[in-house]
Image (tube, rainbow, N blue to C red):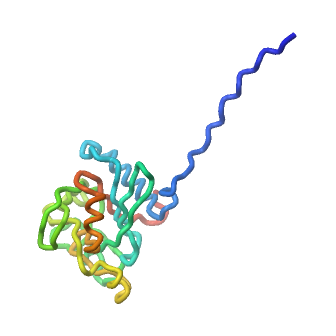
Amino acid sequence: MPVAPQPAPPPVPKPPVPGPLANQPYAKLLDRAKAALDEHQHMFELRDRVALADFNAPSRELRFHIVDLVGGHASSYLVAHGRGSDPEHSGWLQSFSNEPNSLASSAGAYKTGTIYEGQHGRAMRLAGLDPQNNNAEMRAIVIHGADYVSENHIATWGKVGRSEGCFAVARHMLPQLLGLLGPGRLLYANKLTSGVA
């Protein structure tokens, strides 16, 4: 008597293969940025790329990352923190502040705005979306180029210089960075203590 064919067993689900971004030192910060994108979703039509300022790293390292969420890769740059966040100029961000005249960096989610010509040359406006950075526009916190952010500065001093709270980057990298980031995207800045998800 012929044996009826048995139904094939259900396929065993494969665990998700972690992409290269999951192995990056800023992976937890990227998770926070994605959560911020969801929290402020009404603010963002563009969700293909995000910028991360990973202030866990010292200023001599490439710690400003523009992450392509579609392609799964990133471009990384030097970035300064505010002098009020590092009064001893150790090269490490010590604290954040949202207070006017604090000269400090602020943590949280920002929306990138228009590109304009200002006192530092070409720059990009930022709007702070969280209580800890909602004074960004009033404090004129922007992305701009600076001579004190460069490999030469690091070779001489072991760190980049400090801004007055702005995200200052190397002048020669600014056009590429602004081109990738563009207006209407998320910039997320923070310093996560170890063990914090």
Q: Residue at x 25, y 72 (%)?
A: 168
Which residue is painted at 71% across and 25% down in the image? 8
**Residue placed furthest toward the right:** 1
The residue closer to the viewer here, 9 or 197, is 9
Image spot of residue 190 (x, y percent): 35, 63
Specify whether 149 is left or right of 1: left
Q: Could you say which is closer to the camera, residue 115 or residue 33?
A: 115
Q: Return the residue found at the far bottom.
A: 156
Q: Residue at x 40, y 75 (%)?
A: 61
Residue at 37% over, 49% down: 35
Q: Relative to residue 80, is residue 41 depicted above or below?
A: above
Quadrant of residue 111 in the image?
Answer: bottom left
Q: Position of residue 6 (x, y in %)?
A: 75, 20
How many numbered tags mark residues here?
0
Q: Position of residue 3 (x, y in %)?
A: 82, 15
Q: Is residue 55 left or right of residue 13?
A: left
Q: How far across and how far down the image is residue 107, in percent?
A: 30, 63
* Above-or-below relation of 10 to 193: above
> Could you say which is closer to the camera, residue 153 or residue 104?
153
Residue 144 lies in quadrant: bottom left
Quadrant of image for the N terminus: top right
Q: Is residue 96 left or right of residue 7?
A: left
Depth check: 7 or 121 in front?
121
